[in-house]
Image: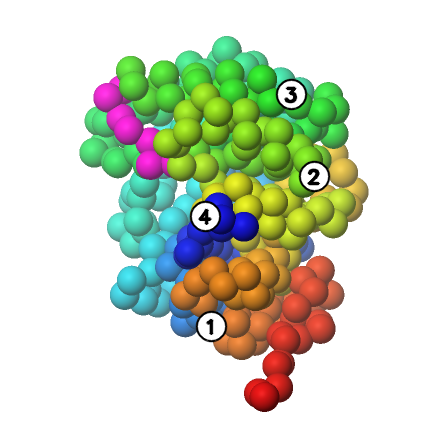
Amino acid sequence: MSDLPATVIIQEEGPREGFQIEGPIPTARKVELIDRLSDTGLKHIQVTSFVSPTRVPGTADAEQVVAGITRRPGVSYTGLWLNDKGLRRAIATERLDVRGGINLCASPTFLARNQNRTMQENLEAQRHMLQVYSQLGVEVNMGAVMAAFGCNFEGEISPATVVLLVGQLLDLASEAEVKLEYVAICDTMAWATPPSIERVIGAVREKWPELELSLHLHDTRGMAIADAWTGLQMGVRRFDAAVAGLGGCPFAAHKGAAGNICTEDLVLLCEEAGIRTGIDLENLLEVAHLAEDIVGHPLPGAVKTGGPLRKRSV
């Protein structure tokens, strides 16, 4: 247990993850959820995606969502984009904390479905994005490897492949004279298990022991909370999460594709392990119920149903 972090950074992605895949949701209700999340102690909320409204109609109102939120001091509000057109849309809102990232993918088939690119084309696209970030004065703070544990189209991904891609991210950053704050290892299609978390994180750590890592976990196969615990034991202190378990990937070709690890479930796990999150769990549980009301169907988060642990004083 000696590697457990004292604190964790939880990056809330529910609004972006959830509303990209749910049926039509009124803009005002999206704003309502984001504003309520802002009062829970979360310090980072990814509010929307600036992507093609034809391919992802659930985020066609991205600019309207950003315009409608009430920014809280100390909270970072970000968006997601896949190209310079999306980046420029995010900058034009003048209401987001715009930081750049570069992304590679461990599965050629998923990459083709998700972004219509080959591996080499994507490598060049990230090199181009670094040039665009520089031209626009956007700080670049992270890299990510998508489908790092497995792929519904190609099967298991080897740790060696992930190490290769992390190396490419670091090389791209070095070429652009950028230092990445952290690299996200993303279980995009929920193939991770505790043993594969150990293998992949261990392989990356062996090559770059000082590199800070983040985990982006999906819960399609019910492994996310166990995977998070394994990551915590290995010293990972950054996690993406989604309130109530909102979301899923529209390009994963899995009928039951689930969203990120549930934020309130992760918060409870951390609290019970003595790891500080800075998040008000009771408040967050109210927001989880709000999320269910907004989408109009049950969401998979467990703690919102079972409730927090209420210990008797002795």
Looking at the rendered structure, the kind of residue marked 3 is Ser
Mark 1 Cα within 10 Å, few/some/many (few <14, many 20+)?
Answer: some
Mark 3 Cα within 10 Å, few/some/many (few <14, many 20+)?
Answer: some
Label 1 with label 2: CB-CB less than 8 Å: no
Looking at the rendered structure, the kind of residue marked 4 is Arg
Residue occupying image coordinates x 30% and y 54%: 95
Label 4, secondary structure: give it. loop
Residue 158 image label: 3
Task: Describe residue 160's horizontal placement relative to residue 141 as left or right.
Answer: right
Residue 61 highlighted magenta (yes or no): no
**Figure label count:** 4
> Label 1: which residue?
280
* Foreground pick, 2 / 299: 2
Looking at the rendered structure, the kind of residue marked 1 is Asp
Task: Describe residue 268's horizontal placement relative to residue 275 as left or right.
Answer: right
> Label 2: which residue?
193
Residue occupying image coordinates x 62% and y 36%: 197
Mark yes or no: residue 270 visible: yes
Label 3, secondary structure: give it. loop
First of labels 1, 4 by sequence position: 4
Label 4 with label 2: CB-CB less than 8 Å: no
Residue 178 highlighted magenta (yes or no): yes
* Foreground pick, 296 / 75: 75
Q: Which residues are magenta?
A: 176-182
Mark yes or no: residue 83 visible: no
First of labels 2, 3 by sequence position: 3
Residue furthest top in the image = 120
Please determine whether, in this image, residue 221 is positioned above or below residue 292. Answer: above
Picture coordinates of residue 1 (x, y %)?
54, 50
